Image: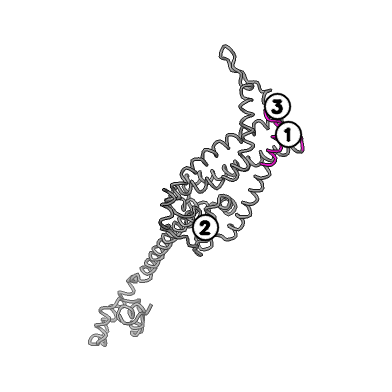
Amino acid sequence: MCWSCCSSSGPKWKREIVRDHKFDYVDLDEFYDRSCFARLGYLWVYIMILKSTAVYLADLWTAISLLALDNQMYAEPVIPTETSKWIFLASIIVSYLLLFWDMVKTRKIIRSRNISFAFTSIIASRYYSIRKGYKYYCLFRKIDKQLDPIPFFVFFTLKGWKRLFLTESPRQVINIVTLVALVPKWIQIEKGGQVLLDNEALGKDLVQKIMTGTMAFSVVIFGISFLLVCLAFIMYVPLLCHIQGNLKEYCCHKVDKRIAELLRRQARKRTAKNQQQQAGRWDAHHQPPTITSNAVEAKNMIYSQPEYAQSDQLGLIAHAQVQPYSPTPSSTYSSPYYYHHNNNNNNYF
């Protein structure tokens, strides 16, 4: 019923590539966030990068131990060593190939400087946040607010299904079987209820013990990732009926709408700020001049002269702001402030 419903009507949205939605056209300084929550989120980006690096280093250590050192993987292997050895090596090689392919795609995204593409790429968003600066992370964080979390959770979680099922699942099955057989030998419970730990069961030497620890660490990470992927797949079916289209294009469409909204807000704030600055400059420029004692004395001298008593100029002078004294009577008419306030049809300034 769901698929028939999806095919009966088309999607109500349309993905359009907006050229202006690039980092070159955005003032990142206006998105700078000094809050404590933003700082903690930026720290979490470093933690996730360290976690991913630790997983790849653990894989590299396992591959070197199997090939160069020719070490046995477990103290008491449940699956034959030769079989598990080549399964591990094959899965590790595939994981690095997938990483290389992701790097190639990320490089194109970084070169495009498209914000929506960078936001929907985990590697690209982390690259901009770490290498380019904190302001880029603040922009991504601002975009992430008020976005529908369900489509983006499903999208980002399902992006890692290839690595999970092609590279992690084969060797994690071997790890789980081995740990299930190893734990009872490591944790021993006496008849009186006393718990004893036999560390010799973890490995014959330090290298085997380190490999057992990395194996347990990778199993925990795999378990969390597997549960999240299963949850995202269950949520993907009704979501697909809702969006009726490609999930990646839908997420980019939502990001573009969010960017457009942020840019409109940014433009309105910039316009309001410019208007306030212009109003402040206008008030400062048209501030009435201060009447000093010299100006009052000059006004009294002008009115005291008999040749101006009956002149038509007396009415003009009476309604004008008094200017600083000048011995020449014509300076009264040459004053810019006087000219501006007595000639409404002429914009002097």
Circles 1, 2 touching at the beta carbon (< 8 Å): no
Residue at 66% x, 30% y: name it.
Answer: 212
| Depicted 202 relative to depicted 68: above or below | above
Q: Nearer the viewer, mark 3 or mark 2?
A: 3
Q: Is residue 127 visible?
A: yes
Precedes in sequence: disc 3 or disc 2: 3
Precedes in sequence: disc 1 or disc 2: 1
Residue at 67% x, 39% y: name it.
Answer: 59
Q: Left or right: 103 with respect to 294?
A: right
Task: For label 1, count other residues whose C-alpha is less than 10 Å away and answer few (under 14), some (14-19) or many (20+).
Answer: few
Residue 257 found in image quarter: bottom left
| Depicted 158 relative to depicted 313: above or below | above
Q: Left or right: 257 with respect to 207?
A: left
Q: Which residue is mark 1?
A: 82
Q: Is residue 147 visible?
A: no
- Image quarter where the C terminus lies is bottom left
Task: For label 2, count other residues whose C-alpha is less than 10 Å away and answer few (under 14), some (14-19) or many (20+).
Answer: many
Q: Magenta residues? A: 68-91
* Disc 3 residue type (three-letter): Ala
Measured Cα–Cα span from mark 3 to mark 2 = 50 Å
* Disc 2 residue type (three-letter): Ile
Residue 320 found in image quarter: bottom left
* Disc 1 residue type (three-letter): Glu
User: Residue 270 appears at what percent x and percent y?
Assistant: 42, 63
Q: Which residue is mark 3?
A: 75
Residue at 59% x, 52% y: name it.
Answer: 127
| Depicted 313 relative to depicted 94: above or below | below
Q: Which residue is mark 2?
A: 115
User: Residue 73 appears at what percent x and percent y?
Assistant: 70, 32
Nearer-the-camera pick, 153 or 237: 237
Residue 260 found in image quarter: bottom left
